Amino acid sequence: MADKVAKLAKQINAFAKSHGGAETQVAYIGQRGARIVLVGEDGGWGDLVAPSYEIAEKAVEKSGLTRHESFDGEFAAKVRTGKYEWKRMAGIQIGG
């Protein structure tokens, strides 16, 4: 488990470094594990999937980044989307 935590923490910190800092949120996704949502200070975003909620929590803790309990409010408002995301969202809405 320690290896997985360390690997995820390294990936989290690499994301933060490339985006001028970052904040996180951990979401349980069932048997698959947990999703670590990353939002950079520049509005860039991404995610990682951990094999368990416990591993995700420990990786975020090890990274030292701010963790939010939910993906809403000011935290969600930091996300910046581009043309690709808007096109994908529109395509989903109209059946594409």
Image (cartoon, rainbow, N blue to C red):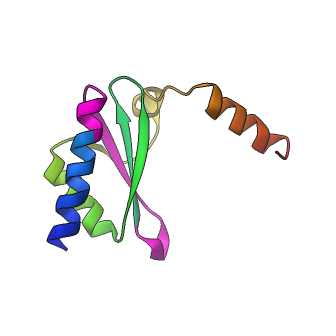
Q: What segment carries the magenta color?
A: 15-33
Say whether residue 72 is visible.
yes
Residue depicted at x 17% and y 68%:
3
Q: How many marks?
A: 0
Residue 61 image point, x, y percent: 17, 53
Image: 40 above or below 54:
above
* 25, 3: nearer the viewer: 3
Residue depicted at x 70% and y 38%:
89
Q: Residue furthest right?
A: 94
Q: Is residue 63 left or right of residue 43?
A: left
**32 within the magenta span:** yes
Q: Residue furthest top?
A: 42
Q: Is residue 4 left or right of residue 40?
A: left
Residue depicted at x 21% and y 53%:
9
* 83, 53: nearer the viewer: 83
Point out the image quarter for the N terminus.
bottom left
* 3, 32: nearer the viewer: 3
Say whether residue 66 is visible.
no
Image: 7 above or below 94:
below
Point out the image quarter for the C terminus.
top right
**80 within the magenta span:** no
Residue 32 image point, x, y percent: 46, 72
Residue 45 image point, x, y percent: 43, 36
Q: Is residue 71 left or right of residue 61?
A: right
Would you identify the image quadrant in which residue 56 lies?
A: bottom left
Image: 80 above or below 52:
above
Would you identify the image quadrant in which residue 16 lies?
A: top left
